[in-house]
Amino acid sequence: MLWCLPGAAAALALALCATGVERAATQARSAGIRPAAQHVAPRPPIVPRARWLGDAARRQPPPRYDDAVVAVFLHHTDTPNGYDCADTPRIIRDLYAGQTGARDWDDIGYNFLVDRCGTIYEGRAGGIDRPVTGAHTQGFNHRTTGIAALGTFTAGVPVPRALTDAIAALAAWKLGGSGTDPRATVRLVSSNGRSRYAAGSTATLPAVAGHDDGYQTSCPGAALSARLPDIRERAARLQGRAQAPARAQAP
């Protein structure tokens, strides 16, 4: 279940949701519904998926899309931390092989992956600039982006500043398209009862959330979870927002 556009555009959005929420977003933009320009952060450098996938791609169905990205879920990949960043493409390729092979997923679940050097990689297919529906947080894949930090960030593990800075920049950019303040909360509808919320129920979650906010898991690890407040604040600054605490918002 997806939220469609509120207010004056509701009738138009409800009619278009059945035929594709992305078309609704296009109509909204043409009607002048846009985030404030001062809250749209620049797009950070992102390595395209072809750079790590090479000729390892499997056949898969076409990507699916939502109308907007209003929340980000942060993950860790639960893989070793002491890697050379030059090996990141191979590590991502191994993750892809595991998810599409042993788990029989249609593609890698994460929309983006970030290594300890702060390099951002495109994950799931569908377009870096588009609101691609991921497969990263049970019940909350719609209207969200999944960002995975390469490594294991349990309690006491150092978290590289380059990593969190890159995550903040990516979150600021992706949330800027919907005008979402990274420090705010948003309302999302659970699509699966195996999440922390019954299917069809509405959850109020942080706009920049940990995987464990939506699903019963220890991901993204206690050390990375502890950095979430800093990531939210940095993302808000990158959007040009004041440093005063944000009020909850409901896209």
Image (spheres, rainbow, N blue to C red):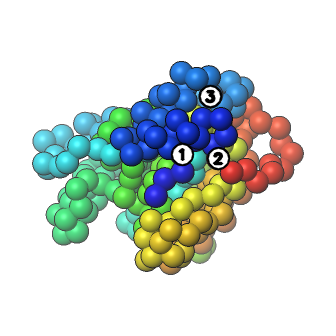
Separation (CA) of disc 2 from disc 3: 12 Å
Q: Relative to 45, is 103 above or below?
A: below
Q: Indicate which disc, 3 or 1, sits on the residue closer to the N terminus.
A: 1
Q: Which residue is mark 1?
A: 4
**In the image shown, does 58 or 223 lie closer to the viewer?**
58
Q: Which residue is mark 2?
A: 251
**In the image shown, does 188 or 151 lie closer to the viewer?**
188
Rendered location of residue 249, percent (x, y): 73, 50
Q: Indicate which disc, 1 or 2, sits on the residue closer to the N terminus.
A: 1
Q: Which residue is mark 3?
A: 33
Q: Residue at x 32, y 39 (%)?
A: 126
Secondary structure under badge 2?
loop
Separation (CA) of disc 3 from disc 1: 13 Å
Q: Count residues near mark 3 (Cα–Cα under 10 Å), then give few for <14, some for 14-19, many for 20+.
A: some
- Give me the disc on residue 83: none
Separation (CA) of disc 1 from disc 2: 9 Å
Q: Relative to 130, is 89 above or below?
A: below
Rendered location of residue 240, percent (x, y): 74, 32
Q: Quadrant of residue 229?
A: bottom right
In this rendering, would 55 be left or right of 232?
left
- Tell me the amino acid under the disc marked 2: Pro
Q: Count residues near mark 1 (Cα–Cα under 10 Å), then give few for <14, some for 14-19, many for 20+.
A: many
In this rendering, would 54 be left or right of 47?
left
Q: Residue at x 47, y 28 (%)?
A: 26
- Tell me the amino acid under the disc marked 1: Cys
Rendered location of residue 125, percent (x, y): 30, 42
For marks 1 and 2, give the one nearer the viewer: 1
For residue 54, say whether it is visible: yes
Q: Quadrant of residue 159?
A: bottom right
Labels 3 and 1 touching (C-beta < 8 A): no
